Amino acid sequence: MTEKRKRELKKLLKELKKVKGRHTELVSLYIPAGSNLADVVNQVRSEQATAENIKSKQTRKNVVAALEKMLQFLKQFREVPKNGLVLFCGNVSPVEGKEDIRLWAIEPPEPLKTKIYWCDQEFVLEPLEGMVEEKETYGLIVLDGSEANIGLIKGKQIKPLRHIESNVPGKTSKGGWSQQRYQRIREQAIHDFLKKIGEQASQLFLEQKNLKGIIIGGPGPLKEEFAEGDFLHYTLKQKILGIKDTSYANEYGLEELVKRSEDLIKEAAIMEEKEILNQFFTELQKEGLAIYGYEKVNEALEKGAVDTLLISEDFDMVRVKLKCQCGAEDERDVKKEEMLNQLCKNCGSKMQVVSKEDLAEILEEKATNYGTKVFIVSTETQEGIQFRNFGIGAILRYKI
Ligand SMILES: [Zn+2]
């Protein structure tokens, strides 16, 4: 799946998450890849018959209507799409007794294996959410004087990797040591402990291909000492996003750290976008390594000259082949929403769309072939909003 499609699907899922039914009348239907369409239709019909038994009149009416809408929608298919199909349908009107039955259809980006039929006050979104989940990786370290835990967060999953016990003695001497000498021994033990954490964390994190950042936590002041000292490999030290207080340094501490670091992770994504776009705008100003516009970027991609391809998440141009009843044919790059309103230059009537290609997807697929990085630009930062006017841009490897 292209980054662009992933982004769009994510947006849609976010919207669907907000949809609430007044009763258990929102229907989710997951049709696995390889299903027989006739069987699916029969199943929906039989669910519709069952729904006639729902006690509440309003709910019954809405569920039956939602299933009817699904059945009508399924008529346009000859077979189940390659990866399966997901339908969400139900009355979304916030007003009791009013009807606003909407249907959403999603062809999953990966072959769907789960079969679900479910009525609820909200839609079942988890299987699709799992498919678009960010697989970005962050390193986690929690520590205090007695232990340390190293882990990763990948998407929403926390993976504990290593547990290290310390040999650091308590704060006050118990034996016959002089307090001063005891303090020195203790400091040495702390240093050794931090060094060990640093070595092990460095080894584990350097193995990660796409480590976006590192977050450090723990209950005491030792975490600051660790973060500020030279315990982590220097390339990793630069990736420290922040330090957070947690109540524990055990595995539970890792979870706690993630909960408290949502802001840091969000901030890191924003920073990355700002950095890339600042580079783009600077290069553009000095007429250096930045270009924009579909044709130019496409040409540069084919030369293998693009380092980073930038696509605004708002970019929605499609290349359409059009045909008119008068016989005229045309190919145009237009906004998706204007695709169906193209008029013939010859006779002025509305033209028919013969085929369409998503321009961003064409470029993204090309990018993969040339080892070009793809960056989808949000519209949530100042720079991102500014970039929206360019739609598509690129930072080049060399000037062409
Ligand atoms: Zn015409």
Image (cartoon, grey):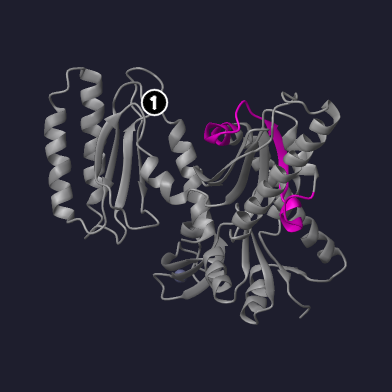
Residue hosting label 1:
93
Query: Is residue 132 shown left or right of residue 89?
Result: right
Above or below 189: residue 350: below
Q: Secondary structure at mark 1?
A: loop
Looking at the image, how many numbered discs can be counted on the residues? 1
Residue closer to the observer: 243 or 97 = 243
Three-letter code for the amino acid on which mark 1 is drawn: Ser
The magenta span reads 230-256
Looking at the image, which residue is at 42% across and 70% down? Answer: 324
Q: In the rendered image, which quarter is residue 375 located in? A: bottom right
Q: Position of residue 198 (x, y in %)?
A: 69, 49
Location of residue 110 in the rendering, given as x and y in whole percent from the top left corner: 37, 57
Q: Nearer the viewer, residue 387 or 342?
A: 387
Q: Is residue 376 visible?
A: no
219 is higher (above) or lower (below) than 350: above
Q: Quadrant of the C terminus?
A: bottom right
Q: Nearer the viewer, residue 190 or 335?
A: 190
Left or right, residue 46 beside residue 231: left
